[in-house]
Structure formats: structure tokens, C-alpha cells
Image: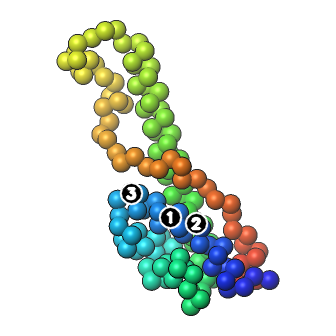
Amino acid sequence: MITPDDAREAVRPPLVLLVDHHVEQGADRMQAYGRVAGLVGRSSAWVRRVLGRDPRATVGLHDALNIRAAYDRVCARVEATTARVDALTAALEDYADEAPARTSRSAARSVPAAARAPARRRQDLRFRRAPLIPVSALAAA
């Protein structure tokens, strides 16, 4: 049987990673709590309580499922960005290998369109999926 403390500890790691992801994207810590709260359907105070291991924070099955869904969406976005960056890097490497010696002015005009894409914020590519929360264990809570 799972205790309320166990349920809080089971959902804490994905919440920490979600908050850290938003902080790395440029939000301050309080904005990150608010963004994560919006993703999981709870208040930012609840997110802070869970992260702070406050015994007053209750974690239900729906909370765990919402956290998992939000975590999966963020992971999918990070993986898609990684794939885009890898494709752009490969295109630039191919272009650099094939390009003859050019002047800087003519080289700038002949850069492929994919390489001239606007710069985006670089995401942390180390953000990976955590193990799934055992739903059967949370259902007993």
C-alpha cells in the first residue's frame, strides 16, 4: 500500500524536471511554478508544497496522470527540437564539406535556407524521460 508521503515522492522528480526546464527556458522560479501548475491543473502553491515535501500537499491519481502527461509533452518537444538541431547541423556540415573556397560575401548569399533559420533558444538536450510512475501503486493511495 502506498502512503501519501510515497505518492508525493513518486511525483516529485518529474515536477522538479518540469520546473527546471522552464527555468532554463528563461522563466524565473516563481513563473516556472505557475507554468507547471497550469500544465498539471493545480495551483503554483500546490507545486511548491509538493516540491518542498510539505505534508499538507495531497497527490491524487489524477494529479499523477496529469504530471506524467505534461512531462511526456515536454519530452516530445525537446526530442523534436533535438532532431531539428541535428538535421540543421548535418546540413551545415554537408554544405561546409561541399563548398569551395568562397569570399565571405558570396558565401553568405549561398548558405542554404535551412541554415539561415532564425536562432532559437537552445534547449537542454539532457532532459530525458524518467521511469513511469506505477499507476497501480498510486491508485491504492
Name the spot of residue 6 as percent of width and height, x first: 69, 79
Whether residue 42 is visible to the viewer of this picture, yes or no, is no
Pointers 2 and 1 in contact (CB under 8 A)?
Answer: yes
Q: Quadrant of residue 50?
A: bottom right
Position of the C terminus by quadrant: bottom right
Q: CA distance from mark 2 to mark 1?
A: 6 Å
**Farthest residue, direction right:** 1
Amino acid at dot 3? Gln
Whether residue 3 is visible to the viewer of this picture, yes or no, is yes
Residue at the spot x=32%, y=36% of the render?
117
Residue at the spot x=41%, y=12% of the render?
98
Amino acid at dot 1? Leu
Q: CA distance from mark 1 to mark 3?
A: 11 Å
Q: Which is nearer the N-term, disc 2 or disc 3?
A: 2
Task: Give residue 111's mark.
Answer: none
Position of the N terminus by quadrant: bottom right
Amino acid at dot 2? Pro
Q: Quadrant of residue 130?
A: bottom right
**Which residue does the numbered mark 2 point to in the structure image?**
14
Q: Which is nearer the N-term, disc 1 or disc 3?
A: 1
**Which residue does the numbered mark 3 point to in the structure image?**
25
Q: Quadrant of residue 108?
A: top left
